[in-house]
Amino acid sequence: MFRETCRVLENKKIAPGHFVIKFASKKIGKKAQPGEFVQILCSDSYEPLLPRPFSFLTATPSNFSILYHTVGRGTTLLSQAKKGDVFHILGPLGRGFTVVSSQISAIRKKQKIPLIPDYRLLTTFILVGGGVGIPPLFHWAEYTLKRRLVSKQSIHVFLGARDKSLLLCEDSFKKLGVQLHLATDNGSKGHKGVVTDLLKQFFLSSVSCPLSSVVYTCGPTPMLKAVSALAKKYEIACEVSVEVPMACGFGACLGCAVKVRPQKTENRKQKTESKNLSFAICPPSSEQYRFAVACCEGPVFPAGDIVWD
Ligand SMILES: Cc1cc2nc3c(=O)[nH]c(=O)nc-3n(C[C@H](O)[C@H](O)[C@H](O)COP(=O)(O)OP(=O)(O)OC[C@H]3O[C@@H](n4cnc5c(N)ncnc54)[C@H](O)[C@@H]3O)c2cc1C
Ligand code: FES
């Protein structure tokens, strides 16, 4: 985790109320993993006092970008930022999505085994995103494809929005060459209805969706809940990124508590401790669940660990 003063390289409107801002960064971009996030202090004054959390959209050793929706004071200030402005940013924070097969791939590379091995063709990677939950999924796809950890044929991206103008990152995903499945509430593009209708059809087709599939999802809570339920029903592994309101971003304020089942997250707890992150674990408040701090133990959790109210 670094505290860095980052210069704005560009800040572009990409859809109604949505912008992509790119920052120069020597430290944060280099370490960013898909699903991790930054805390941005959006103002030099006391309003707003607290930094705001945003997922990475892209990251390289010299810069990173985020895609944001203007919903309040902080994001409105961010939308007014000009090239050359500076922001105080903390990151990368949290635990991101599993970057599947990375170790196997590194071993193969070392042994000079061709990098199109069969195991990658056996797994289908299913990314399901809505709204500002889409950026970390794009980061996952770009990150894994750049490193040749997965093949583009194995990635299926499901995007849902109210209207076609809000199908964020559609063109960027197309450029990656992944399989796209689109749904809009008003039918202006793709399937008319919710994205989980398409996902259900996909799960029902055992040809396109083998048991070794894995789902990564981020977006509005009702969508996460529905995706988790479908993944459970069809016995598909699933990781969920929860975007709960956060204050500090590093485990100090306990303001980002989410209910999780106690036993199953034990491993993640140990892994988090071994990364020497500072975090606080709330004791189990009942036999059914305990509170996890989403900024350190998450924001990505195994779907089966989350207790949806
Ligand atoms: C790990 C994480 C990653 C995120 N990634 C992105 C991203 O990539 N792009 C993006 O646009 N946004 C993202 N968000 C949400 C973003 O942090 C909020 O939209 C932002 O803090 C709002 O700040 P504001 O000052 O503009 O609005 P505020 O004035 O603070 O709030 C405006 C409205 O938004 C609601 N709100 C604030 N935070 C959240 C939240 N986390 N979830 C749901 N509602 C919220 C408030 O309750 C209020 O109704 C992420 C949040 C988390 C926790
Ligand atoms: S935001 Fe402070 S503990 Fe998570």
Image (spheres, helix red, strand yellow):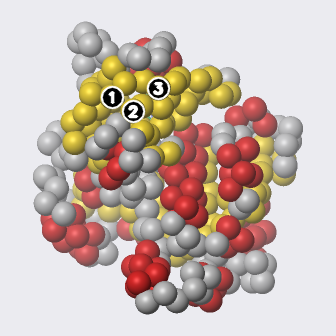
Alpha-carbon distance for marks 3 and 2? 6 Å
Give me the residue at 78% from left, 69% from top: 201
- On the image, the x and y values in percent for residue 73 come to 41, 16
Residue type indicated by callout 2: Ala
Q: Relative to residue 244, is residue 252 drawn left or right?
A: left
Label 2, on which residue?
24
Residue type indicated by callout 3: Leu
Q: Relative to residue 297, is residue 55 drawn left or right?
A: right
Assign a secondary structure to mark 1: strand
- On the image, the x and y values in percent for residue 286 come to 22, 64
Label 3: how many Cα within 10 Å (few below 14, some 14–19, many 20+) = some
| Label 1 beta carbon less than 8 Å to ligand 1 | no
Name the disc covering residue 9, or none.
3
Tell me which image quadrant ligand 1 sits in.
top left
Q: Are marks 2 and 1 in contact (CB under 8 Å)?
A: yes
- Residue 217 visible (yes or no): no
| Quadrant, the C terminus | bottom left
Label 1: how many Cα within 10 Å (few below 14, some 14–19, many 20+) = many
Residue type indicated by callout 1: Cys
- On the image, the x and y values in percent for residue 111 come to 43, 89
Assign a secondary structure to mark 3: strand
| Label 3 beta carbon less than 8 Å to ligand 1 | no
Alpha-carbon distance for marks 3 and 1? 9 Å
Q: Is residue 168 above or below residue 197?
A: above
| Label 2 beta carbon less than 8 Å to ligand 1 | no
Label 1, on which residue?
6
Label 2 vs 1, first from the N-terminus: 1
Q: Are marks 3 and 2 in contact (CB under 8 Å)?
A: yes
Q: Is residue 177 above or below residue 288?
A: above
- On the image, the x and y values in percent for residue 263 come to 26, 75
Q: Relative to residue 46, is residue 162 drawn left or right?
A: right
Give me the residue at 65% from left, 28% from top: 14
